[in-house]
Amino acid sequence: MADKVGWYTEVLSRTSMPSEIHPTNSDEFHAEGTLLGLGAIRVARFTHSPLLSRRTPRLIRAGDPEQYQLVLLLKGAAWFTQNGFEASLQPRDMALWDTSRPYEYGSGLDGRDVEAVVLQIPKAVMPLPAQQVDRFLARRLTAGKGLEVVLSDFLLSLTINGPDTCPGSLDALGSMAVELVAASLAQQLGAQRETPAEVRAHVLLRRINSFIDQNLGQPDLTPRLIADRHHISLRTLYTLFEGEPEGVAESIRRRRLEQCRADLSSPRLQDEPVQAIAGRWGFANAPAFSRLFRVVYGTTPSDYRHHILGTREHASDAAADGEMPALVPGPS
């Protein structure tokens, strides 16, 4: 049974953070779980028998993913202590902790297994300032109404439906999850209107970027459409992008071109006409797409595809013949 405890401790260390694990009953310990990547965000769902867990300063020095982790309890009972506070959780309750600080966790005081969902959020992508997030560490967040219900239902749905979602949409789902967490915490801090303007702008920009990624294939995806869908003026939209490396229209064109270039590089799509690929990513005018592609990449879409796939075919043939294609010039 020690092997099972060691295995679970190692899995937690690799997928979450280094922690001590002390089962209440080592002879009957069991655990299982799944992990889904959502870009920089990850969501895990796990079940385990009663245990105590600690994260000490020594373990923090051994490894810190620098995350906020939000747990949604599905079954059983659990408690967390951190930052001088303690949260006792029942099913549908949530709690937040910081991986950079010591904490203790206990479950199964009633003898039952615990089932939970954990959302792992890198601190770098959390829109709210750290001082505000700190106010929620080891505090019980109930999912009784409003945004908390939406958030808890969304997290549960991620673990059920996320694995069947196309890979290109997973980043957007991760961004949505972070936005819901930030909006829920901001509301509890004193309503959305009291959230700092820069935080609201950051959340809105993330939402707009997710919207763009999900709608690149729509030929009518324009700044006007984006502004209308988000109930803001064009001027406000342009202002949001002033601090970005590129404007909103330029951002749409770049993302479309990058998707087209990726498809043109794919051996699986080598028989698909160039104009079909262009159309799939929102370029309704094939000649205009070819001109733009050439301006940006210095070659036509067809020549780019021929060069990329031809290079790969040559490398594959060389490997099949037992040769290693030269990647760098040899010494002269």
Image (tube, rainbow, N blue to C red):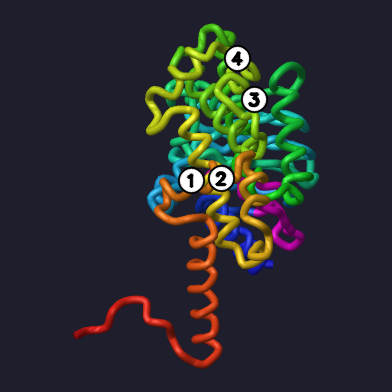
Q: Residue 287 carries which label?
A: 2
Q: Is residue 233 magenta?
A: no
Q: In this view, does 157 lie above or below 321?
A: above
Tell me the amino acid under the disc marked 2: Pro
Q: Which of 30 and 282 is in front in this view?
A: 282
Q: Residues within 10 Å of mark 3 (few under 14, many from 20)?
A: some
CA gap between label 1 and label 2 equals 6 Å
Tell me where residue 326 appears, x and y as whole percent: 37, 81
Nearest to N terminus: mark 2 or mark 4: 4
Q: Which mark is residue 140?
A: 3
Q: Is mark 4 on a helix, strand or loop?
A: helix
Nearest to N terminus: mark 3 or mark 4: 3
In the image, which residues are magenta?
Answer: 23-45
Instruction: Identify the residue under disc 4.
Output: 188
Q: Which quadrant does the N terminus fall into? A: bottom right
216 displayed left or right of 25: left
Q: What element carries label 1?
A: helix
Q: Which mark is residue 291?
A: 1
Q: Is residue 35 magenta?
A: yes
Is mark 3 in CB contact (under 8 Å) with mark 4?
A: no
Q: Nearer the viewer, mark 3 or mark 4?
A: 4
Is mark 1 in CB contact (under 8 Å) with mark 2?
A: yes
